[in-house]
Image (cartoon, rainbow, N blue to C red):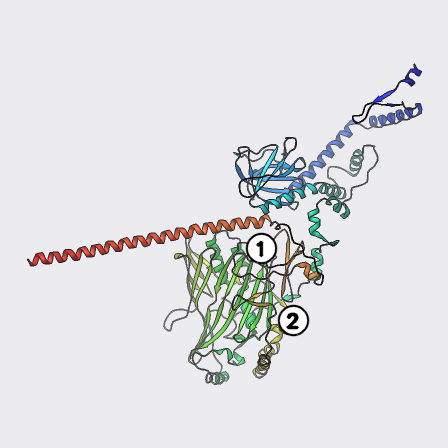
Amino acid sequence: MLERRKERKLTITSPNEDMRIVEPPAHKQRRASLSVAYHRLLSFSSSPIKKQKKEYRDEKKRVNDELLSALRDPTVVVMADTLKIRGALKRWNRYYCVLKPGLLILYKHKKADRGDWVGTVLLNHCELIERPSKKDGFCFKLFHPMDMSIWGNRGPLGQSFGSFTLNPLNTSFLICRAPSDQAGRCWMDALELSFKCTGLLKKTMNELDDKNGDSSMNDGQRDESRMSRDSDGDDTRELAVSETDAEKHFQEIDDVQDEDHEDGKMSETSDTIREAFTESAWIPSPKEVFGPDGSLTEEVGEENKSLIWTLLKQIRPGMDLSKVVLPTFILEPRSFLEKLADYYYHADLISEAVAEPDPFQRIVKVTKFFLSGFYKKPKGLKKPYNPILGETFRCKWEHPDGSTTFYMAEQVSHHPPVSSLFITNRKAGFNISGTILAKSKYYGNSLSAILAGKLRLTLLNLGETYIVNLPYANCKGIMIGTMTMELGGEVNIECEKTGYRTTLDFKLKPMLGGAYNQIEGSIKYGSDRLASIEGAWDGVIRIKGPDGKKELWNPTPEVIKTRLPRYEINMDEQGEWESAKLWRHVTEAISNEDQYKATEEKTALENDQRARAKSGIPHETKFFKKQHGDDYVYIHADYRPWDNNNDIQQIENNYVVKTISRHSKRKTGNSEQLGSDNTSEASESDEEVIEPKIKKKEIVPAKSKPITPEVADERIKEMERKFELAIRRMEAANERQSSRTLNAIQSTLLFVFVVTSVVQSIFMFFMLRK
């Protein structure tokens, strides 16, 4: 029997090769294998089955917890936006889609709660393909190759049943439509990235679990769980996710590597950018000094009346005072560039306008911000310094939301005196630019300071630009009576895109009766008056609109306490042409009430300016350049909407405002100023700041780079607003045409009635005469 067993042959069939004969193992080898199998059987039987089941449940619970933590963690989001999705009835519905590593979660609305969950797609079961479509937009399809279900059984908060929909979704595939080709390409790239980073996320979670520990397992159980994952029963080392593993995991994403690598070098990180572009050293500004309440009045001292009479003898009514040297006792010890910054202590009010969806309420909030800058008055009736050509000033305000408003100003011309300014806070969503021509006129017993020019307030996320002019300051009682300063003139706040306009009339006190500092105005859409405004520009201002009469602005002590804290540069670190340092000797003399010293220092600065003008060398501006006629624009202006996924912070260094981003930019160009007539140059890229001397090779892209879904959505909303505006204008035109037609019919009927009456009168006259 043993000999027959030795002679017996074993045959093994392979699908790719013919039959082959295998000799049976030797007796010693077979005996060794039986020994190993026996020891394994003993080890298996020695471990109780209850312990193995517990390890199985713990492992299953750990995997479940990892998945739920990825679902609930708001930071683990690859992309999120609204998409159109086709259901089983071949109808399209809008859903808010949140893409996470390995998962695509669908909600009914953007502000999702527990009941708005529709379903969760398991991406590891899916394939992705672009789908042709006759409709507009970009269509793509997620499907299971074996026509099995792609949906998970649980929601992000453990829901077992999704929200009820009249148009149910297909079980084995999902057809999605993005609003544009660029947005669809972004979704395709994000889904591919989500496929790639699923494994890396699991490795990271395992590593965090090993470091932090699991509440349901002690150390011994975790060690046994790791050993149970090894098929041979040997101990396995802890999984560590290093940077090398992460780079290997993403080796297949060639397009990302092409963007992040050039000539074998990695792109600079935000930390490197911060080191290369450090922020200026800001210090809190000195405590503000407010003037008295009520009108601005001041009694001229006896020692200064003679100087005023001497000055008045040199000028004639209607003369421009820009070339007249004024005495120092009427000067406010700060520059005109700094005084223009008083209007932006409540810049946080613009954030309310940016977040307002209704265009009428938006212009109401913009009007409120404009009126918030007038109530601060200097101590006494003073005039700021006339800026020297080339003089600059900068400051900033810190907002409660963590954003920063930067103010940059430069005197770009002396004759005529022109000041340019730029205010920016991209995170809050606005930029303000302006070119102001200051002129003064003398009228005998009064003089006026006229601020010619306009400010342009741009809401970056909405693409709207509000154009504003400024009132003039009138000072009366120079020769007879008490010197009093008031604001006068008509101010218009107009947005061409929405069609809304605010008109404010700053009224001067009449000779008999009336009150100081009164203001009246209205908000119109076309010729329709929607609201009226009245009050005092240094006190309570009320608005009467569709919702009734309510308070628009009131600078109470509590409101004044909410003024944003202002910061400026320390005197020792300022440049020679910055306002505080340029006028420091004049300011010190005025503070010491030394009028002769102040006049001497002021004259020295003015003589130096005249000498530079006579030299024949043309002046070159530093931070502003002339554009669009007589307007000057800030050369580092950035009108891009704030990108929460990429932009980190705005910082300033030597009058250059930059945005620190997570990803450096390779190319520079003109930034697009949405909704504004003027376009300014884009700010220099972060990479240019780090490596300004490296010459980069030019890359011509084969196709246009896809924009983000947020920008695409904003453009769609902009088109909807334009369409709504066109409909409103059409309705207004129809109403005007109807009114004209009705007036014409009434005029015609009146004319026929008059003619008929005249004919009847003539006929009756002849009849009576006969």
**Which of marks 1 and 2 precedes in the sequence?**
2
> In x, y percent, where is residue 140?
60, 40
> Where, quadrant-wise, is the C terminus in this rendering?
bottom left
* Vertical arrangement, residue 205 with respect to residue 367, above or below: above
Where on the picture, by quarter, is residue 285?
bottom right
Tell me the element at label 2.
loop
Asked if the residue under mark 1 is in contact with the one under mark 2, i.e. CB atoms within 8 Å, the reply is no
Left or right of 259, for residue 611: left
- The amino acid type found where label 1 is placed reads Pro
Evaluate whether residue 696 shows in this view: yes
Task: Quote the CA–CA distance across marks 2 and 1.
Answer: 31 Å
Tell me the residue at 49%/81% (across/down).
301
* Vertical arrangement, residue 479 with respect to residue 688, above or below: below
- The amino acid type found where label 2 is placed reads Gln
Residue 574 - label: 2
Where on the picture, by quarter, is residue 608?
bottom right
Q: Which of 449 and 372 is in front in this view?
A: 449
Tell me the residue at 10%/58% (across/down).
765
Left or right of 123, for residue 743: left
Evaluate whether residue 555 shows in this view: no
Query: Farthest residue toward the left?
Result: 770
Tell me the residue at 61%/42% (across/down).
98
Q: Nearer the viewer, residue 38 or 533?
A: 38
> In x, y percent, where is residue 124?
68, 37
Where on the picture, by quarter, is residue 79?
top right
Q: Mark 1 points at which residue?
A: 641
